[in-house]
Image (spheres, grey):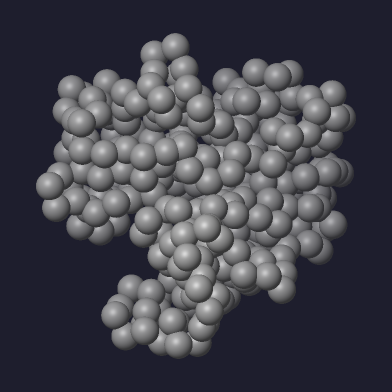
């Protein structure tokens, strides 16, 4: 069991939690994720790490109420416990591999849509701690769904907040802000976009037109998180990839978003999973390359 040291609601359907998990906190890096389980019959849910404190031995996650398992977690309070938390999983952000002196020479734009603001935050915080100024756009449906604004403002060079309905900050989607910044003469060497697949698709469509290399963090359905189940299979360029072990970050201009979104829908039913297994053949399983699932 893992103790929740802090629980608070960021919005009606979003819960922020600090969880005691010293081993994960010691080793995790921005871009990675964990899999949690709450309740005896709870499902295993992949969640990107929003923050971590190595001294306190805690990791921070944000849960959005969508289905049965996340609805169970909605009423978690400070002092409660969750049954399991496994990680860190996935690969850290590839930007962390670039020497800091080089990063300081780059103009980097981070884009967070909705819950995607949470996994954007640790990357921006890491940049700030290493003296790298970056611009950040966070978007939400309305003012009530804007999250982590104060935290982000403390670490971003420039922060642009936009809402679809114009109830707070700028009016319009994140792509409109990118277009506005380009029109103002802003130039970026790199973009990192995290959010709903449809948002990332259109951000990538725009950044490709603008000539801005773009990294996305893919969030397809995951079951085991180790590459064995094949649920998070993606096509990136001409290659089969698995988000849990090859990602979650990929070159956004190479991701087949339409296929990924269609696959998300199909994977939700037994018939759909059977069809995917038939269509994908030997590449349906085996993301880890070691489990035998690809044999």
Q: Position of residue 263 (x, y in %)?
A: 47, 75
Horizontal side of residue 281 vs 75, given as left or right? right
Indicate whether 55 appears above or below 62: above
Horizontal side of residue 95 vs 154, given as left or right? right
Indicate whether 171 appears above or below 201: above
At x 18%, y 22%, the residue is 79
Front residue of 73/20: it is 20
Front residue of 249/294: it is 294
At x 59%, y 54%, the residue is 246
At x 51%, y 31%, the residue is 28
The quadrant holding residue 202 is: bottom right
Indicate whether 72 appears above or below 129: below
Q: Position of residue 29 (x, y in %)?
A: 56, 31
Total number of numbered discs in the rendering: 0
At x 48%, y 22%, the residue is 26
Q: Would residue 235 be visible to someone looking at this image? A: yes
Most extreme residue toward the left is 40
């Amino acid at each position: 069991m893992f103790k929740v040291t802090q629980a608070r609601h960021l919005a009606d359907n979003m819960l922020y939690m600090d969880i005691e998990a010293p081993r994960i906190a010691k080793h995790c890096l921005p871009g990675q994720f964990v899999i949690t389980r709450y309740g005896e019959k709870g499902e295993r849910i992949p969640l990107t790490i929003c923050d971590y404190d190595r001294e306190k031995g805690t990791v921070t996650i944000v849960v959005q109420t969508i289905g049965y398992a996340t609805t169970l977690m909605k009423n978690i309070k400070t002092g409660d416990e969750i049954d399991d938390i496994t990680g860190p999983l996935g690969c850290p952000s590839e930007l962390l591999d670039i020497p800091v002196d080089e990063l300081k020479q780059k103009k980097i734009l981070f884009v967070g849509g909705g819950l995607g603001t949470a996994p954007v935050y640790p990357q921006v915080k890491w940049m700030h701690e290493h003296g790298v100024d970056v611009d950040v756009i966070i978007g939400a449906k309305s003012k009530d769904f804007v999250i982590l604004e104060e935290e982000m403002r403390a670490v971003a060079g420039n922060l642009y907040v936009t809402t679809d309905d114009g109830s707070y900050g700028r009016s319009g989607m994140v792509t409109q802000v990118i277009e506005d910044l380009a029109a103002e003469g802003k130039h970026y060497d790199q973009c990192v976009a995290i959010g709903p697949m449809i948002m990332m698709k259109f951000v990538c469509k725009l950044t490709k037109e603008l000539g801005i290399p773009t990294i996305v963090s893919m969030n397809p359905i995951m079951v085991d998180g180790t590459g064995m189940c094949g649920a998070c299979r993606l096509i990136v360029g001409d290659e089969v990839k698995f988000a849990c072990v090859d990602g979650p970050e990929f070159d956004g201009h190479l991701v087949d978003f339409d296929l990924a979104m269609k696959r998300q829908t199909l994977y939700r039913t037994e018939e759909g999973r059977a069809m995917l297994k038939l269509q994908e053949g030997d590449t349906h399983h085996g993301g880890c390359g070691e489990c035998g699932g690809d044999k």
